[in-house]
Image (cartoon, rainbow, N blue to C red):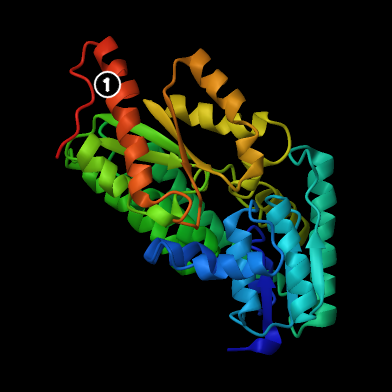
Amino acid sequence: SRPEATVLHEDLVPPEILLAMNLEPWMPELLGIVLPLVDPPFMEPYIDLAEESGFPPDLCSLPKATSGLLLSGQMPPAVALVTSNMPCDGGMAQYALFEQALRIPTFRLDVPHNFYDDPAVAYFAAQLKELILWLEERTPGRMDWDRLREVCAERNRAVEHELELWDLLRARPAPLAAEAVYLTHLMFGIGRPGTPRGTEIFRRMAELAAANLREGKGALEDERFRAALWNPPTLIFSDLFAWAEPRWGVALLMDMLTYHRHPFVDLRSPDTMLRDLARILMQGPMARHTRGPAANFFGDLFHFTEELSLDMIWMAGHIGCKNTQALLGMFRELCRKRKLPLLIIDYDLSDTRIVTPAGIREQVDRFMETVMRAERLDRGDQGAEPHG
């Protein structure tokens, strides 16, 4: 609605600063993420267009889908573009095409390899200051520090409800699971964090979980297994757990995009706000786990596996994700040492032609009928048997 104030921002660059500058954020990856959830094959023509234009076939299908949208003229007019070196080479490289095709000023944020230490935080906070000055020179936006404080305070309120929800998920049976957890966080991430709507989503989820717990109700009528989904959710089969819940009694309690370590933002000064926003941005979902040392990939996962008393891990083995494909051998070995059942689902994030939803269901059935059946028999249970 305001092209002169619209700024395209990569999916791992949160919009808080843009909102505080009275600019209109637009995430190029938005449609590539949301549309396959609604219609699984929807992005395939855009993937083909990107490949016909020179993108490698083995590149992640999300940047290919996003670039296909750009090449077909589906991006809104904008005054500037803000991107970063996250989450992977493919996601980063697509923005060279954006800059060339749109011919708009582009700012690239540089996240250090080891992004947890204090020098990295200071370095990146300085980059955010540069970004603000850069935007003020090239857009009608002007930083309103009071407005940024309001946005960050709203984000803090959302995080309070989020932590409450995570605490409630420890109960068995879990009072909330699957889509209510991961779609809530997914929509928060790709929507507008730091807005009342985002806070309201988390508040309502926490209230629903608390009400279910008080009434002794679980999210599943028959919770037999508790699982985590590592890597992004299966966009081409968003009904994976809606199907697995009644069939196998599997409750999905946590996933890679949902679980993060975002700090509360210190609201005392512009410097403290930028420092904590720097931490939040550098520790973005998925990118925090797939960049830097391999320990980043495993640490959070094994932590909440114990915290939530999970029975198994499902790994959404998106074939276009080079970062995570390279870790699968190590992943198997670490799970074997922990005697933790691991299912690696072969599929593609946005392309049903690689593996269909039926193919995903077949992989799950084989795993549950063999590995988890043996697991339960070892415990003296009846084993994993499907319902229907």
Figure check: 28 above or below 114: below
Figure check: 370 above or below 193: above
Mark yes or no: residue 199 visible. Answer: yes
Which residue occupies the extreme front position in the image?
Answer: 52
Closer to us: 143 or 237: 237
Residue 248 occupies quadrant:
top left
Report whether 204 appears left or right of 245. Answer: right
Mark yes or no: residue 142 visible. Answer: no
Which residue occupies the extreme left position in the image?
Answer: 388
Q: Residue at x 48, y 31 (%)?
A: 304
Mark 1: secondary structure:
helix
Residue 371 occupies quadrant:
top left
Q: Name the image quarter holding the C terminus.
A: top left
Residue 71 in picture, x, y percent from top left: 65, 77
Report whether 39 appears left or right of 44. Answer: left
| Residue hosting label 1 | 373
Residue 369 in picture, x, y percent from top left: 27, 26
Q: Residue at x 30, y 34 (%)?
A: 365
Closer to us: 63 or 199: 63
Residue 212 in picture, x, y percent from top left: 22, 45
Closer to us: 304 or 75: 75
Residue 220 in picture, x, y percent from top left: 22, 41
Report the amino acid beneath label 1. Answer: Arg
